[in-house]
């Protein structure tokens, strides 16, 4: 492996750094965006039951806010439980935007790496081509060793750039779709909470 890196020349280190960042982001988002962590099952019926039996208390709001992103949305709505349905929905929407922003964390970085990796590979290719042309002597001959090195730099950087870009783009689109799905699910559950609290829905 080190021989490949050495053959690819110094431009490959830019791609390697980008790949390390991409792997870190993918691992962190895969752990953070678990359904059991973001939108735990059974939270909505539990919250509605507690509201009907004990009412909304400060302790309940604190527990919900620290429970999960879905709990944060519920807590924002229940803070205004004595207000109108519209006010309650507005507070939920505001909390939902904040939660959505948190769920999107680092995805821009991953998308940037997916877009930039082929360009970094192209940059390495250009460097390799420069070395190839630089291997030509004024008399028209060329240095075979330098020529081979230039070809290696050109080809390896292109390959590594594409190799990093493909999984980065796949995971970027996967996480984007997952976040969008989670946000829609939280909005629907929050709407059910509003309707249940205001006596418009039985859960």
Image (cartoon, rainbow, N blue to C red):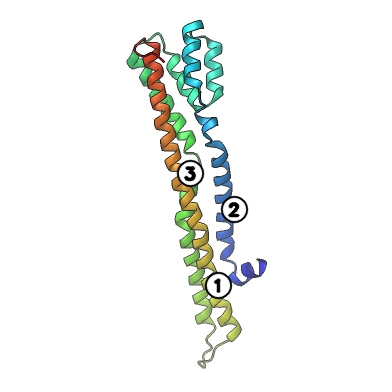
Quadrant of the drawing holding the C terminus: top left
x and y percentages locating residue 168 in the rendered image: 50, 52
Mark 3, residues whose alpha carbon is within 10 Å: few (<14), some, or many (≥20)?
Answer: some
Q: Are marks 1 and 2 in contact (CB under 8 Å)?
A: no
Determine whether the residue tagged by mark 3 lies in a helix, strand or loop. helix
Q: Quadrant of residue 73?
A: top left
x and y percentages locating residue 132 in the rendered image: 52, 80
Q: Nearer the viewer, residue 49 or 31?
A: 49
Q: Earlier in the sequence, mark 1 or mark 2?
A: 2
Q: For mark 1, what is the residue?
A: 153
Q: Earlier in the sequence, mark 1 or mark 3?
A: 3
In the depicted structure, whether residue 114 falls above or below residue 201: below
- Residue 107 disc label: 3
Q: Are marks 3 and 2 in contact (CB under 8 Å)?
A: no
x and y percentages locating residue 19 in the rendered image: 56, 55
Q: For mark 2, what is the residue?
A: 20
């Amino acid at each position: 492996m080190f021989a490949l890196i050495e053959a690819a020349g110094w431009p490959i280190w830019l791609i390697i750094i980008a790949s390390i960042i991409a792997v870190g982001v993918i691992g962190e988002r895969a752990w953070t965006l678990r359904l059991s962590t973001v939108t735990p099952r059974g939270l909505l019926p539990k919250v509605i039951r507690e509201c009907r039996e004990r009412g909304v208390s400060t302790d309940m709001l604190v527990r919900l806010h620290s429970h999960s992103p879905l709990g944060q949305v519920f807590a924002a709505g229940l803070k205004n439980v004595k207000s109108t349905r519209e006010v309650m929905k507005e507070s939920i929407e505001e909390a939902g935007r904040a939660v959505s922003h948190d769920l999107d964390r680092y995805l821009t970085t991953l998308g940037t790496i997916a877009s930039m990796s082929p360009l970094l590979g192209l940059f390495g290719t250009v460097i390799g081509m420069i070395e190839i042309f630089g291997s030509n002597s004024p008399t028209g001959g060329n240095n075979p060793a330098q020529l081979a090195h230039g070809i290696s730099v050109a080809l390896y950087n292109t390959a590594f750039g594409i190799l990093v870009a493909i999984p980065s783009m796949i995971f970027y689109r996967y996480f984007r779709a997952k976040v969008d799905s989670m946000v829609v699910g939280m909005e629907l559950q929050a709407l059910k909470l509003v309707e249940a609290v205001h006596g418009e829905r039985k859960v």
